[in-house]
Amino acid sequence: MRPTILVTGSSGQLGFELLRALAPLGKVHAPVRAEFDLARPERMQAWLDRVRPDIIVNAAAYTAVDQAESKQALAFALNAAAPELMARWAGAHGALMVQYSTDYVFDGSKSGRYVETDVPGTRMIYGASKLAGEQAVLAHAPRSLVLRVGWLFSAFGNNFLHTILRLALERTSLSIVADQIGTPTSTQLVADVTAHMLSASLSGKLSEPWGIYHVSASGEASWHEYARHIVHELTLDGVKLACAEADVLAIGSSDWPTPASRPANSRLDCSKLAQNFDLNLPHWHEGVSYALAQLLRSGALRNTRWTQGARRKL
């Protein structure tokens, strides 16, 4: 019998991809906020009791990193209390749960890549709220997968790739932070990895697949290197940008202060994922190339000055 799957946050960039990736595994439910509002525990409880999902995939969250510094209560309500409610329900009913966390649970002081057993430490409210959420899920849902991700992008939604595209079309130069390092990772990749992990976990071939996993593409970059790569690829595709690659300038974090202090090192080690689920993930360049191909094919740049005959193919 095909399992019933709840996907929260289906209107977001990750949730959008999860609907596609999880469809072959079971009957996917994607309730709108009016039906399943993370800020309304009574509605969440009523929905869970009525539909009784076999799998809960929680892609909904409060993701406004800087605003969280002044909206601590809201951040913890959505990122910690809501996942705890879902985890308690999952634990009581034998459901499997997937919770997404973040590289921002770490303070960035480590010199190498972070592994799952590294002790978290964060300097921001957003990171603290997501850490509380993952701890609650692990405590109350024995059959749970907590996937730490970071630097997510997609051809759809609001993200760094879209911001750089918009700015490069408008401005002759860009100043981008160069002293924060991470791995740009596509939501399509995260969704596909999630589907693979769920399929393998449900098969019963893995004795103890549960717990925390780091999920990111391979390779690394600073925000500055990431931005230059986007501009470089768009230029190769014939997009007429106002900004050339050489005009993407490097600045320090101190030159671009933000309410939330971002970690200097956001690199995640995915060795545990590779070992337990036999997955070796592609370089982040591949995800960017595919996302840009989607943008070009979709006509999202139709009203900009880009030339026909782009080289990219999906």
Image (spheres, rainbow, N blue to C red):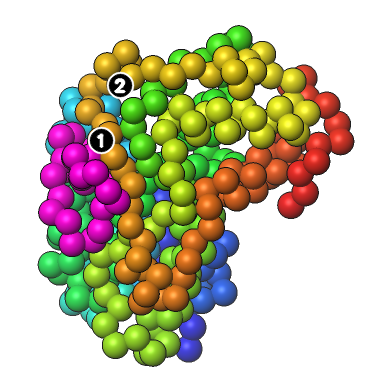
Few, some or many C-alpha atoms within 10 Å of disc 2 (few <14, some 14-19, many ≥20)?
A: some
Query: Dot 2 corresponds to which residue?
Result: 253
Q: Relative to 32, is 211 on the left or the right?
A: left
Q: Position of residue 14 (x, y in %)?
A: 46, 51
Distance CA(mark 2)–CA(mark 1) = 10 Å
User: Do the residues under discs 2 and 1 have CB atoms within 8 angstroms?
Assistant: no
Query: Dot 1 corresponds to which residue?
Result: 263
Residue at 59% x, 32% y: name it: 230
Looking at the image, is 298 positioned above or below residue 243? below
Highlighted range, magenta: 100-128
Residue toward you, 296 or 78:
296
Residue at 49% x, 16% y: name it: 249
The single residue placed furthest to the front in the displayed view is 111
Few, some or many C-alpha atoms within 10 Å of disc 1 (few <14, some 14-19, many ≥20)?
A: many
Q: Looking at the rendered structure, which numbered label has been put on residue 36? A: none
Q: Relative to 295, is 223 on the left or the right?
A: left
**Circle 1 sits in a helix, a strand or a loop, which is it?**
loop
The single residue placed furthest to the top in the displayed view is 172
Q: Position of residue 13 (x, y in %)?
A: 49, 46
Looking at the image, is 195 positioned above or below residue 62? below
Residue at 37% x, 46% y: name it: 150
- Residue 117 shows in the view: yes
Q: Which SS type dominates the magenta stretch?
A: loop
